[in-house]
Image (cartoon, grey):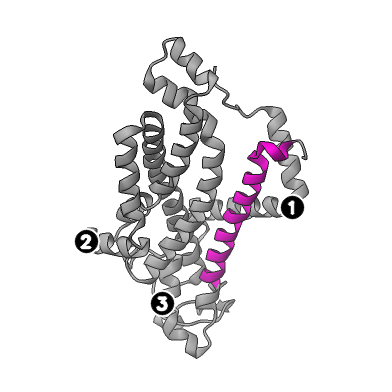
Amino acid sequence: MSRAAVPTEHGARRALRIMVASKWPLLAVAFLFFASVAAAFGPVLSPFDPNRQNLVLRLADPMAVGPDGSLFWLGSDALGRDVLSRLLYGARVSLLVGFAAIAVGGGIGIVAGLLSGYFGGWVDDLIMRVGDIQLAFPFILLAILFLVVLGSGVGNLILVLGVGQWVTYARIVRADTLSLREKEFVEAARALGDSTVSIIFRTILPNILAPLTVIASFNVASVILSEAALSFLGLGVPPSVPTWGSMLAESRDTLVANKWWLAVFPGVAIMLTVLSFNILGDWLRDFLDPRLRERT
C-alpha cells in the first residue's frame, strides 16, 4: 500500500556508480569513514593520554621527539599535551554530539510535523506557533542560556543542540504530510481500516524520508559547528574533555608566538568534517531527487 522505496541491490549499485563518477562525494565519505574510525578507536590509536601534561615539552613543534624517544606527530600544546591524541579524542565528541543531537531533534521534529500535518486545526496551530517562538530567538543565545543553567556536559550539550533542530524537521514533515494525507494510497489505507498511528508512521512517514535524509546530513555539519562554537566559549563540555572547539580556544594565547599548529590542526579537522557532510548532503539531494534519476 505504501510507496516507500526500500533500497535494492540495483539502487545500491547505482548509488556507488554515481558516487565514484562524481569523485567528491566519494572523497567525503572516505574522510568521514576515517574520522569515524579515529573517533571509535581513539583510545587505541592515540599515542598518549590526551590530558597528560609535560611542561618540559610544552609547545613542542610537530614531529618533535621527547627525551624518552616518544614522537609528537602534531606537536604539543601549552601544557605539553599531545595534539594528535587530543584531536582523536575530540573527534569522538564532535561526531557523537553531531549524530545524537540530530537523532533527538529529528525525532521530536518528525513526530511534531506528522501530527501537525495530519490532524491540522488547533494541533497544527499549537505546534507551529511554538516553533515560531523558538525561531524568534537567536539559537546561539538560547544555547548559551540553557547551558549556563543546566551546566556543561555532553548530555546537556546534545539535549540543547537537539532541541534547537526540531523546527526544521517539523516544518518539512508538516508540508509533505499535508500533500500526502489526501493521496489515493492514504485513502485506501483508511478504507482498509488501518489505525491512525499505522497510517501516519507506516504509510506517510516512509514516503517523506528522502528529504529528511538530506536535511539530516546538512544539519550534522551545522551541529558540529555549533558544538565547536560553544566549546570555544567554554560552555560545551568540561575542560577535562578534549574537543576541537576547546583546542581552538586554548590556541588563542599562543598564536602570537607563531605556534600555528595549535590552531591549524583542529581548525582543519572541523573544516574537513563540515565540508564532507555538506558535500554528502549535496550528493544525496541530487541522488534522491526523482527528477534527476533518469539523467543518471
**Disc nearer the start of the sequence (3/2):** 2
SS category of the residue bearing label 1: loop
Q: Between marks 1 and 3, how big is the CA–CA gap?
A: 36 Å
Q: Amino acid at mark 2?
A: Val
Q: Which residue is mark 1?
A: 23
Question: Does residue 187 lie above or below 228 as drawn?
Answer: above
- Give the residue at x 52% y 84%: 259
For the magenta stretch, what is the residue range? 265-293
Q: Is residue 231 above or below residue 276?
A: below
Residue 95 image position (x, y, % from top left): 47, 54
- Rendering coords of residue 169 (x, y %): 44, 44
Query: Does the segment drawn in magenta span residue 291?
Result: yes
Labels 1 and 3 touching (C-beta < 8 A): no
Which mark is drawn over residue 250?
Answer: 3
Q: Which mark is residue 149?
A: 2
Task: Give the farthest residue toward the top.
Answer: 192
Q: What residue do we see at 33% from left, 70% from top?
A: 234
Residue 244 - label: none
Percent x, y for residue 1?
54, 16
